[in-house]
Image (spheres, helix red, strand yellow):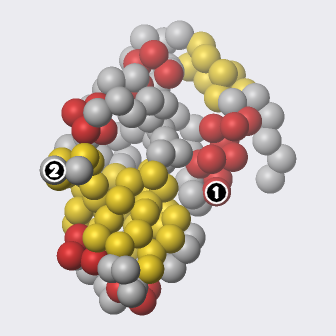
Amino acid sequence: MPHRDTWATCEKCEKQYVFTVEEQRRLEKMGLEVEPSLCPECREGQPVESVESVESVESVESVESLEEGEQAGVVKWYEPRKRYGFITMRNGEDIFFHKNAIAEGNERDFDEGVKVTFSVTESDKGPEASEVKLAR
């Protein structure tokens, strides 16, 4: 599908903003072709309540700005021998996950490019994914 910058209107502040080609490609790569309902200013720092409530988050500065609740992402890679891997979140950032975080599915199912849902928790080494499940 060809991409081009398009105008969108924020549902919160009603300002018009540009839904950029870069953001469209990032979402498409993750299998998500939904236009954000909020402008970048309204999305920034906004806690995400569920996968459906916010289509994209532009900046991640701390686990507080990440969210409470379920998020969507794509497995960047997972190495069963090492028992860990990384998930690319909807905002383009990567987050660590350990085998123990897999809530549903066999660890062999978590190949590169597989869509997953997960929650974010704070560990002693920073934010990491928990309750990782194959997306339905």
Residue drawn at x 28%, y 59% is 129
Residue occupied by mark 2: 124
Would residue 103 appear left or right of 52 to someone viewing this image?
Answer: left
Residue 108 appearing in the image? yes
Residue type at mark 2? Asp
Residue 74 percent location from the top left of the image: 49, 63
Residue 48 appearing in the image? no
Q: Within the image, what quadrant is residue 3 found in? A: top right
Chain-order first, disc 1 or disc 2: 1
Would residue 79 appear left or right of 104 to someone viewing this image?
Answer: right
Residue type at mark 1? Lys
Mark 1 and mark 2: Cα distance apart in space? 31 Å
Residue 14 percent location from the top left of the image: 48, 12
Residue drawn at x 17%, y 52% is 123
Residue occupied by mark 1: 29
Crowd class of label 1 (few under 14; some 14 to 19; many from 20; radius 10 Å): few
- Establish if 62 lies above or below 95: above
Q: Secondary structure at mark 2?
A: loop
Q: Nearer the viewer, mark 1 or mark 2?
A: 2
Residue drawn at x 61%, y 17% is 17
Would residue 38 appear left or right of 51 to someone viewing this image?
Answer: right
Crowd class of label 2 (few under 14; some 14 to 19; many from 20; radius 10 Å): few
- Establish if 10 lies above or below 61: above
Q: Nearer the viewer, residue 119 or 94?
A: 94
Q: Nearer the viewer, residue 54 or 71?
A: 71
Callout 1–callout 2 Cβ contact below 8 Å: no
